[in-house]
Image: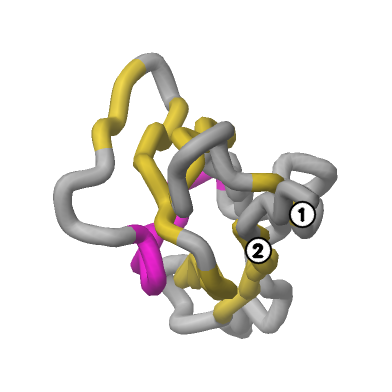
């Protein structure tokens, strides 16, 4: 009898929430840092993580991503895949809004 793993990995509560940020004064951008989500799997093995939407040039240090996002909307997505091919997704939106001075 063989068992088949049908349980997807889990990001638990490590997926960042959507962010609405205002640009730095006098600019149209803002430096933002967020923690890299940490998926786990019921097998005990660390799932493979594929990242989408993190701009090239972003700095990765101490499990954090830091990047100066320009005004606009960004979708950041992480996909965790276990050894059996089961997948879980973590995605969140970063929106940088310009400041208006009247």
What is the CA distance from the residue labelled 1 to the residue labelled 2? 5 Å
Along the line of sight, the residue nearer the viewer: 24 or 40 = 24
x then y, percent, for residue 93:
67, 67
Along the line of sight, the residue nearer the viewer: 6 or 81 = 81
Question: For this view, does 65 lie left or right of residue 78?
Answer: left
Q: Residue at x 46, y 53 (%)?
A: 28
Along the line of sight, the residue nearer the viewer: 95 or 82 = 95
Instruction: Give the position of the N terminus as an image quadrant.
Output: bottom right
- Residue 49 colored in magenta in the image: yes
State the residue position of label 1.
Answer: 20
Q: Residue at x 69, y 46 (%)?
A: 22
Tags 1 and 2 touching, CB below 8 Å: yes
Q: Which residues are magenta?
A: 44-54
Q: Does residue 3 show up? A: no
x then y, percent, for residue 87:
57, 79
Label 1 SS: strand
Q: Badge 2 local density, few (<14 within 10 Å), some, or many (20+)? A: some
Q: Earlier in the sequence, mark 1 or mark 2?
A: 1
x then y, percent, for residue 49:
39, 60
Question: For this view, does 66 lie left or right of residue 42?
Answer: left
State the residue position of label 2.
Answer: 95
- Residue 22 colored in magenta in the image: no
Residue 9: image quadrant is bottom right
Name the disc covering residue 98, or none. Answer: none
Question: For this view, does 68 lie left or right of residue 100?
Answer: left
Residue 27: image quadrant is top left
Residue 68: image quadrant is top left
């Amino acid at each position: 009898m063989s068992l088949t793993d049908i349980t997807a990995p889990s990001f638990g509560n490590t997926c960042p929430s959507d962010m609405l940020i205002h640009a730095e004064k006098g600019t149209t951008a803002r430096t933002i840092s967020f923690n890299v989500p940490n998926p786990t799997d019921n097998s005990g093995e660390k799932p493979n993580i594929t990242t989408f939407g993190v701009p090239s040039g972003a700095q990765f240090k101490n499990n954090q991503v830091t990047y100066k996002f320009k005004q606009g909307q960004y979708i950041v997505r992480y996909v965790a895949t276990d050894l059996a091919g089961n997948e879980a997704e973590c995605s969140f939106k970063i929106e940088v809004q310009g400041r208006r001075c009247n």
